[in-house]
Image (tube, rainbow, N blue to C red):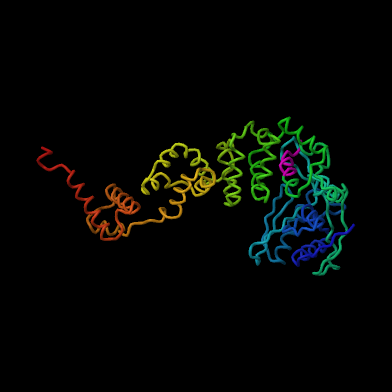
Amino acid sequence: MSVRLRLPKEIITIATVAQRMGGRVFLVGGPVRDSLIGYLSPDWDLAVDLRQPTANSRQPTAKLKKFLAETARQLPARFVFHTRFLTATIELKNSDPPKRIDISHTRQEFYPHPGSLPIVKPASIEEDLYRRDFTINAMAVELTPPSAFRLSPSAFRLIDPYNGQGDLSRRLIRIIHPESFILDPTRIFRGIRFAIRLGYEIESGTLYLLRKTVREKYPALLTPERVLYELRCIVKEKEALKILEAIVHEGVLAAAWNWQPPDNFLTEVKKVVQSGLGPEVLYNYLLSVLPVANSWPITREERESRAALENFLKIEKKLQQANKPSKIYQLLKGTPLPALKILTAIKNRSIIKKIELFLNELNFVQPALKASDLMALGITPGPLMGKITRELLYAKLDKRVSTPAEELILVKSLLQKVKGRQPTADSRQ
């Protein structure tokens, strides 16, 4: 069986550099799968074998780094090398948007215990394919030698030791070995994601082992970072809603954190997805519901958005009753934008209209008078200036003033009230 591919010149350059160093380069995993089902993959995942018959165990690491440096020089590109996993990412310098190519050394993986990150060791392409998650992702084509390549599509021999092509034709997701989900429970997320993305079924034996792994709580062995990575991949999927529904139905999140989603979880997920606000908003919504701990690797903005959504219950009734624009402004000012976007997707129409008013209009209102104008009236920076500035803004929001002249009259009136409240010399005696 052969696969026809049109190789970009950058891939030919990489293959040429590898061959000059006595190595072999393979296109692996998803891009091969996608090519076989007629889908043009945006990714180029490469595996390179730089081993020598008499090499010691450390040589491939040094040789891989040398290969990456030479490749980056010729493309030109920059690269990041992860020594522990023998992986790297190349980012082309003259590409807009930036184009990334993932490269790894062909390797074996050993898991010290279920759910841990693997220990890797350089190995053959056949051993590399055995470590992969599903048969349809355990295929490769060799891209060396590059001398026969042209920019037109060329035929490449398919390396398919686990009959991934057969499972593609049967539209099945199948693991390669029985302990696959136990050793790496993130494959549970990926198996469900691939099945729904491709419209495939999970093979019966694989589904049995998936559910057994969930029942035995193996997802709880994963770090939050690894689960969150899988959720980030899911929210980017076209069928994110269906994938999240399946993950909840299979109890995967419950097994990961001993946590049950609230009754309205999937209803609100559906609203966020259908709002069209994008993957980041959906991800922020998930973080607002999941049992996030202080140790979880999320950004400051994500944590603040989560806190704002938790606190919204305290102001929701006040916002529902607020009629003045200034009151709406005061209740919503300082709420992170991701949280406001989520609220426009999941709340009732009355609340949504007020949030949209804040986002589209109130948040941009500014008085014409500036601090310098207030200082010209004898108001020094401090609490009094802050109070007058706020009152001026609220009057502008409520349309009690509209011109600079009206703002000036209001400021002078506020000053007069302040002076009227100040005690006289006689009253202080």
In this orientation, which residue lies closer to the viewer: 204 or 67?
204
Asked if residue 24 lies in the magenta stretch, the reply is no
Up/down of 220 relative to 128, above or below: above
Up/down of 149 relative to 346, above or below: below
Where residue 22 sits: x, y (%)? 84, 60
Residue in the image at 48% along x and 47% along y? 352
Q: How many marks?
A: 0
Give the quadrant of the N terminus. Answer: bottom right
Residue 235 as seen in the image, left or right of residue 178 = left
Residue in the image at 66% along x and 65% along y? 95
Where residue 238 sits: x, y (%)? 67, 51
- Picture quarter containing residue 133? top right
Give the quadrant of the C terminus. Answer: top left
In this orientation, which residue lies closer to the viewer: 362 or 290?
362
Let me know if residue 379 appears in the view. Answer: yes
Q: Residue furthest front?
A: 349
Residue 190 as seen in the image, left or right of residue 305 = right
- Dominant secondary-structure state across the stretch colored magenta: helix
Residue in the image at 37% along x and 45% along y? 323
Asked if residue 189 lies in the magenta stretch, the reply is yes
Where residue 331 sits: x, y (%)? 41, 44
In this orientation, which residue lies closer to the viewer: 74 or 391?
391
Residue in the image at 60% along x and 49% along y? 274
Where residue 332 sits: x, y (%)? 43, 46
Residue 424 as seen in the image, left or right of residue 250 = left
- Magenta residues span 182-192
Up/down of 158 relative to 223, above or below: below
- Picture quarter containing residue 302? top right
Residue 282 as seen in the image, left or right of residue 237 = left
Let me know if residue 128 appears in the view. Answer: no
